[in-house]
Amino acid sequence: MDKTAILWNIETENEILKINKHKGEVISVSFNSDGDKILTGSFDYTAKIWDSFSGDLICDLTEHKGEISACQFNYAGNQVLTGSIDKTVKLWDLRKPDKSLKTFKGHKDEVMDCTFNLTGTKIASGSTDTTAKIYDVKTLKEDFTLEAHSKELSKVVFDSKGTTLMTGAMDANCILWDVETGEMKQILKGHKEDIFSCAFNYSGDIIITASKDNTCKIWSSKE
């Protein structure tokens, strides 16, 4: 944990840019869809946006009162989402980055992950309070609290259609949820230890999960 983020040329394997102005560990990194901006989230309680060509700092998002656990651009690149150990999720409008657009305060414990859907119309968050939440970006209100896991959540991810949310947790399970109703669709059981990561393929019919049990599993979401 050297408090830096490094941009690499994947063809030459050469370092292109080093970001070293955070005062704490960098825990989350995200590109915007155009690739000209980089978002970094740090244990120094801040998220920062950088010019990916010059390395110049564009703006500093400084409202959180705890370590940043996750951060992400929306697809349009005009909004940013940050989640924190301070139990909150913040939505930022990059046209007015001096103050967050909305602070979501529904979780009772640390927020471990947060994400936009592909169209940027919905937000999801996962917490050590064992719940996930879905929010509507237009109304800035909570749609659903998702309760079924028995241990803290580590990952939340939408499928590309935005109709299904997948949550991964330390109870060794992944759960699929209906975004429109908040109802549980399916539990993926098979891992023996904590789920650390999970993802859909683009078409949404294949899922991969990764666990502390040293295995990855591939699932067909049609079955």
Image: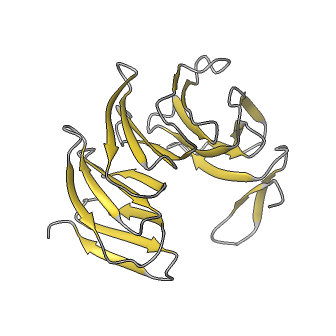
Coloration mode:
secondary structure
The quadrant of the picture occupied by the C terminus is: bottom left
* Image side of residue 14 versus residue 92, left or right: right
Residue 115 in percent (x, y) is at 45, 43
Q: Residue 161 at what x, y percent from top left? A: 25, 47
Residue that protrudes farthest toward the front in the picture = 150
Image height of 37 relative to 154, above or below? above
Residue at point 44%, 50% (across, down): 130
Residue 30 x, y percent position in the rendering: 58, 48
Residue at position x 42%, y 79% in the image = 192
- Quick check: 201 left or right of 213? left
State whether residue 142 is above or below residue 169. Answer: above
Q: Nearer the viewer, residue 185 or 96?
A: 185
Quadrant containing the N terminus is: bottom right
Q: Quadrant of residue 32?
A: top right
Q: Is residue 29 visible?
A: yes
Q: Is residue 99 left or right of residue 188?
A: right
**Quadrant of the image occupied by residue 93:** top right
Q: Residue at x 78, y 41 (%)?
A: 44
